[in-house]
Image (spheres, helix red, strand yellow):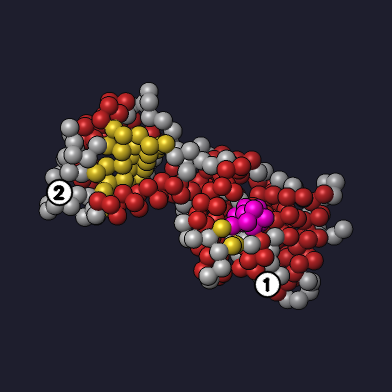
Amino acid sequence: MSAYPLLVFVGTNLWEKRQALKALQEKEAFLQRRTFEIADQALPWEDLLQSLRTMPFGGRPPLLILRQVEKCPARFQELLVAALLGRAHQNRVVLDLEASPEGSFLEPVLSEATTRPFPPLRREELPGWLSRRAETRGKQILREASLDLLALGGEDLFFLDQAVEQLSVYVGKRETLTAEDVRRLIKPRLFQTGFELAKAVGRRQVPEALTLLSRLSPQEKLQALVGSMGWQLRRLRQAKGLIREGCSKEEISRRIGLRWEERGPFLEAAASLQEEEMDRVLERLLRLDVESKTGLSDETVSLETFILSLAQKGGEFSGET
């Protein structure tokens, strides 16, 4: 029996997984923390297997995190299972999975494992989650403030947690976080807004695109937003081509440089968009960028007009109403 039972984290709630790993590392004072992406074709397998088998030096164990284990190439599955069963007792190993490993090649290692579920939060659970995050900082967040935060950050727990921390510092000794505090301090993430706008425009979803645009603060630089939209569309266009070529999700993610947490929604959006449509949007965004930088048109009006042109029958993103 291992001194450290194998831990299996199952689910897509990345924020809570990260908090659990952080608490684990702080509690047990690990000598080092190493993460292996099992689906990565360039993974140094000898290094991984040796790390699992090697007895650590000194009194503190290493923390070894294995991600995407369910996507392990078939030729390495037997080797990985054998290494997990025969790992050094002082090694703390965490398998980070999206789906339950039951019935998979990992079944032999489950008898000695402790499984912890990390399901995604439902939309209706987020106000309660925000209240608990505020309470950890000695604050109370009003419901209207919670709804405003959710409008700005969606279901991104990393963004929401950081926003609660910023608000808590901002209000000082005051115990209540209000909607006015949110409106004064918290801005929508330009990076995420650029992606969501690019997706909505590519799908010709006019109300959604205008709603996203309305959330920007008056100080937001629309040139930066146009640049972000163009960058995201070029990445989506590249991903669409790789999907058509039959590349795996792992290969696409590696070549485009997708972070783990953005992979799912990004590839879903890429698969749903039409290449010709993306090309037209990119061409119009380039014209918008030139017009705004040269002062030929007002940034906000141009972008709003551009989005409204999506509603035109057979509109070609001319930007003319």
- Mark 1, other Cα within 10 Å: few <14 / some 14–19 / many ≥20: few
The total number of labels drawn is 2
Q: Is residue 147 magenta?
A: yes
> Which residue does the image show at 78% across and 74% down from the upper left?
296
- Mark 2, other Cα within 10 Å: few <14 / some 14–19 / many ≥20: some
Q: Can residue 18 be seen at all in this image of the molecule?
A: yes
The extreme right residue here reads 321
Towards the viewer: 300 or 163: 163
Res. 41 image quadrant: top left
Q: Is 287 on the left or on the right of 61, as rendered?
A: right
User: Residue 312: percent from the left, percent from the top?
Assistant: 85, 49
Identify the residue position indicated by label 2 in the image. Answer: 56
User: Residue 277: percent from the left, percent from the top?
Assistant: 70, 48
Residue 14: numbered disc:
none
> Which residue does the image show at 48% across and 48% down from the upper left?
261
Q: Secondary structure at mark 1?
A: loop
Towards the viewer: 200 or 220: 220
Reading the chain from its start, which is encountered first: label 2 or label 1?
2
Identify the residue position indicated by label 1 in the image. Answer: 219
In the rendered image, the vertical position of residue 244 relative to residue 186, given as above or below: above
Residue kind at label 1, given as amino acid type: Gln
Residue kind at label 2, given as amino acid type: Pro
Q: CB atoms at circles 2 and 1 under 8 Å apart?
A: no
> Which residue does the image show at 27% across and 27% down from the upper left?
111
> Which residue does the image show at 29% across and 32% down from the upper left?
113
Q: Which residues are magenta?
A: 141-153
Q: Taken as a whole, is the magenta stretch helix, strand or loop? A: helix
Towards the viewer: 317 or 306: 306
Q: Is residue 198 magenta?
A: no
